[in-house]
Image (cartoon, rainbow, N blue to C red):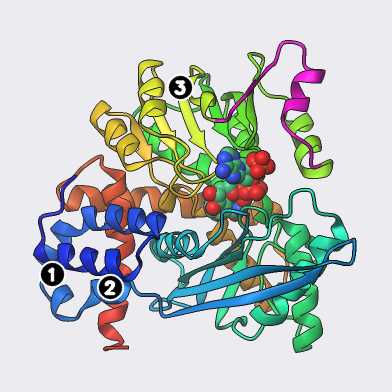
């Protein structure tokens, strides 16, 4: 899609120059801008008030050294980040990613997306993201703990229950959150909801672990239902085998789908009988092993090296739940040729712009990440509410709230797309609905 607005083109040029080399951030900004033209036509105030220029510039970017000692006694140094992007509608909220590929451009793309995602949930939460180029894979428990403690020793100066509340993301699960929470408490002497995704013994919330994957399926089911379809009887392919992928598999199966393939960063498994989720959970959540081991105990299953091949597996519904730019043009073509009817994005920005364009042209139902994976942050907010009231809600209560939030998000993006003349384009609908609320708050708060 081409951008026609001179205003948006000018801001894009500034982003390109000022944030040179941050390709993922530029990709995320471009996608949002492509949706905003009809909004600008109806709201000339946006340009006069510099809303877009302010939106692409984080309110605060914190970069810090993280020194820690490995098991051999050697000092290691990583880089830590927290980008507090926009607090117009509430305290900053967004996950922490620990992965060797992390640099400022990745954190900024994730933080920028988070602004709109958080707004779409209908809850009062601003957008942020953080993390480090530390790779927890292959590290001992002690090494992960020492890294997390060092990371939090700096981060704790910038976060707080009413300021900025981080959560997990790639490489950051309840173990890492637990170590960081312990260090925060030790330094600040406060037992408060400063992190979400805590385990239950640390005042975490039921359903938070399942939330992103479950929420993805609730929203995808709502989208399918509107088109007279459902998960029931469908073949489903899910990339990844981490937190989001595992609980998307669980919910898709409960809704009557059969998940036939999953992956990790080395390769993918195909099981025509439907994936044995208990085995995947054991391998990934308990033993921290590779997915290739699945095929060793499941004779009908096959393992293929290389993760992109997963999109050649025939399916009705595709749920990319691994990482950004996982589905490129070629993978999208394969999915379309094989009769896929719906794609729901569990990971952040897992489809390239070319892939999204193909999906939209082919009429596939396409639920973009900022709507489809918002269940995690929505449930984090429910965790914050429970923490501040010092209560703990039942699994059923949190799950019901999550389902309602996902159905509302779907309805909001569908209705916004219709109102702005692009019915059925949920990418535009999600961007517009998320943007309008933030822009209104920014207008009301004056030039800050
Ligand atoms: P996990 O670390 O639990 O799992 C990530 C999975 O993706 C693993 O299977 C991993 O394989 C695979 N993966 C990671 N990097 C790559 C890569 N470069 N190529 C191929 N596969 C890769 O992370 P989550 O499940 O928490 O997050 C997955 C996605 O969902 C991310 O995009 C994240 O931003 C997004 N998300 C997560 C939320 C949450 O609540 N956790 C909320 C909203 C979005 P391996 O083990 O081999 O590295």
Is residue 311 visible in the rendered structure shown here?
Answer: yes
In the image: residue 36, left or right of residue 331: left
Q: Secondary structure at mark 1?
A: loop
Q: Residue at x 63, y 54 (%)?
A: 99
Residue 90's x, y, as percent? 46, 77
The residue wearing badge 2 is: 439
Query: Does residue 241 sit above or below 306 in this rendering?
Result: below
Query: Does residue 113 sit above or below 279 in this rendering?
Result: below
Q: Residue at x 18, y 81 (%)?
A: 49
Residue in the foreground of this view, choosing between 140 and 223: 140
Q: Secondary structure at mark 3?
A: loop
The residue wearing badge 3 is: 316
Quadrant hosting residue 237? top right
In the image: residue 238, left or right of residue 33: right
Q: Residue at x 68, y 52 (%)?
A: 209
Mark 3 to mark 1: distance in Å? 40 Å
Quadrant hosting residue 6? bottom left
In the image: residue 137, left or right of residue 95: right
Quadrant hosting residue 239? top right
Mark 1 to mark 2: distance in Å? 10 Å
Marked residue nearer the N-terminal end (2 or 3)? 3
Residue in the foreground of this view, choosing between 336 and 443: 336
Q: Disc 1, ligand 1: is the CB inside 8 Å?
A: no
Q: Which residues are magenta?
A: 288-307
Mark 2 to mark 3: distance in Å? 37 Å
Residue 81's x, y, as percent? 57, 71
């Amino acid at each position: 899609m081409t951008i026609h607005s001179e205003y948006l083109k000018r801001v894009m040029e500034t982003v390109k120059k000022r944030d040179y080399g941050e390709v993922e951030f530029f990709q995320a900004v471009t996608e949002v801008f492509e949706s905003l033209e009809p909004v600008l036509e109806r709201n000339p105030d946006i340009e006069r008030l510099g809303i877009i220029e302010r939106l692409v510039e984080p309110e605060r970017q914190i970069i810090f050294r993280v020194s820690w000692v490995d098991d051999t006694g050697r000092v290691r140094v990583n880089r830590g980040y927290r980008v507090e992007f926009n607090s117009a509608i509430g305290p900053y909220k967004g996950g922490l990613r620990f992965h060797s590929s992390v640099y400022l451009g990745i954190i900024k793309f994730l933080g920028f997306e988070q602004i709109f995602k958080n707004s779409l949930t209908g809850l009062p939460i601003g957008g942020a993201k953080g993390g480090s180029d530390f790779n927890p894979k292959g590290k001992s428990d002690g090494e992960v703990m020492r890294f997390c403690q060092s990371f939090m020793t700096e981060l704790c100066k910038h976060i707080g229950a009413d300021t900025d509340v981080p959560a997990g993301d790639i490489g950051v699960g309840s173990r890492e959150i637990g170590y960081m929470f312990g260090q925060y408490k030790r330094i600040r002497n406060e037992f408060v909801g400063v992190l979400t995704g805590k385990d239950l013994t640390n005042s975490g919330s039921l359903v938070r672990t399942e939330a992103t994957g479950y929420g993805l399926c609730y929203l995808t089911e709502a989208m399918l239902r509107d088109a007279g379809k459902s998960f029931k009887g469908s073949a489903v392919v899910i990339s990844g085998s981490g937190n989001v992928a595992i609980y998307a598999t669980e919910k898709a199966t409960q809704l009557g789908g059969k998940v036939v393939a999953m992956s990790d960063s080395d390769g993918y498994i195909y099981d025509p009988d439907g994936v044995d989720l208990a085995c995947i959970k054991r391998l990934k959540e308990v033993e921290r092993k590779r997915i290739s081991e699945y095929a060793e105990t499941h004779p009908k299953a096959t393992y293929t090296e290389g993760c992109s091949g997963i999109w050649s597996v025939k399916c009705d519904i595709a749920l990319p739940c691994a990482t950004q730019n996982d589905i490129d043009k070629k993978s999208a073509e394969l999915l379309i040729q094989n009769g896929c009817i719906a794609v729901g994005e569990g990971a952040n920005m897992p489809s390239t712009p070319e892939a999204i364009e193909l999906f939209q042209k082919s009429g596939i139902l396409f639920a973009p990440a900022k709507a489809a994976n918002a269940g995690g942050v929505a449930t984090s907010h429910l965790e914050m509410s429970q923490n501040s009231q010092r209560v703990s809600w039942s699994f059923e209560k949190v799950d019901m709230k999550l389902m309602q939030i996902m159905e509302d998000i779907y309805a909001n993006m569908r209705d916004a797309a219709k109102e702005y003349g692009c019915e059925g384009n949920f990418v535009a609908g999600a961007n517009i609905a998320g943007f309008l609320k933030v822009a209104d708050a920014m207008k009301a708060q004056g030039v800050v």
